[in-house]
């Protein structure tokens, strides 16, 4: 059964904590969104990042989105207490474009992110 439009809005609003953290270079908003044991997987400039979401917090707190940063949130699917969100990011730190997939679970009536997997656009990978 398809979820209501209001539920889609609730998931999108939760995901805005993610984009606000990235844009401002302040992980505090994302820390409200992710569970303490959330995981991260992706390649940043060709190097695998995996494990604790703490690495994402470090990246965000180290580099802000910058003036040219743009993002778009797409709620891909909601199935009762499970949601998948795609976030497109352009210009993080003035040079990197990402596609993020966030996996949400609704716990105690609140949408929380339990996993983040991402792809860095190959044209933005820093060459050594």
Image: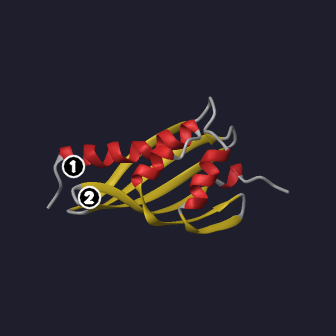
Viewer-side residue, 9 vs 121: 9
**Residue indicated by mark 2:** 78
For the residues labelled 2 and 1, the Cα–Cα distance comes to: 8 Å
Q: Residue 104 location in percent, x, y? A: 35, 60
Q: Residue 115 location in percent, x, y? A: 45, 64
Most extreme residue toward the bottom, as rendered? 51
Most extreme residue toward the top, as rendered? 67
Q: Compared to 8, does 37 lie above or below?
A: below
Most extreme residue toward the right, as rendered? 128
Q: Residue at x 58, y 35 (%)?
A: 69
Instruction: Give the number of marks.
Output: 2
Residue 124 has which mark?
A: none
Q: Residue at x 45, y 63 (%)?
A: 36
Q: Would residue 103 be found to the left or right of residue 50 on screen?
A: left
Quadrant position of the C terminus in the picture: bottom right
Q: Quick check: marks 2 and 1 in contact, CB under 8 Å?
A: yes
Q: Compared to 69, does 7 lie above or below?
A: below
For disc 1, the neighbor class at 10 Å (few under 14, some 14 to 19, many from 20) is some
Tell me the element at label 1.
Answer: helix
Q: Residue at x 59, y 64 (%)?
A: 42
Tell me the element at label 2.
Answer: strand
Q: Would residue 44 be found to the left or right of residue 99 on screen?
A: right
Quadrant position of the N terminus in the picture: bottom left
Q: Residue at x 16, y 49 (%)?
A: 4
Q: Would residue 57 be found to the left or right of residue 19 on screen?
A: right
Residue 7 has which mark?
A: 1
Q: Residue 86 location in percent, x, y? A: 43, 53
Q: Earlier in the sequence, mark 2 or mark 1?
A: 1
Viewer-side residue, 114 vs 9: 114
Q: Residue 41 location in percent, x, y? A: 56, 67
For disc 2, the neighbor class at 10 Å (few under 14, some 14 to 19, many from 20) is some
């Amino acid at each position: 059964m398809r979820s209501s439009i209001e539920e889609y809005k609730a998931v999108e609003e939760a995901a805005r904590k993610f984009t606000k953290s990235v844009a401002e270079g302040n992980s505090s908003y994302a820390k409200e969104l992710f569970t303490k044991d959330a995981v991260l997987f992706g390649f940043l400039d060709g190097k695998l990042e995996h494990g604790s979401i703490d690495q994402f917090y470090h990246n965000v707190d180290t580099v802000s989105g910058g003036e040219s940063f743009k993002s778009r949130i797409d709620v891909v699917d909601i199935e009762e207490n499970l949601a998948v969100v795609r976030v497109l990011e352009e210009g993080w730190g003035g040079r990197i474009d990402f596609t993020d997939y966030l996996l949400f679970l609704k716990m105690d009536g609140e949408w929380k992110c339990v996993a983040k997997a991402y792809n860095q656009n190959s044209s933005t990978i820093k060459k050594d």
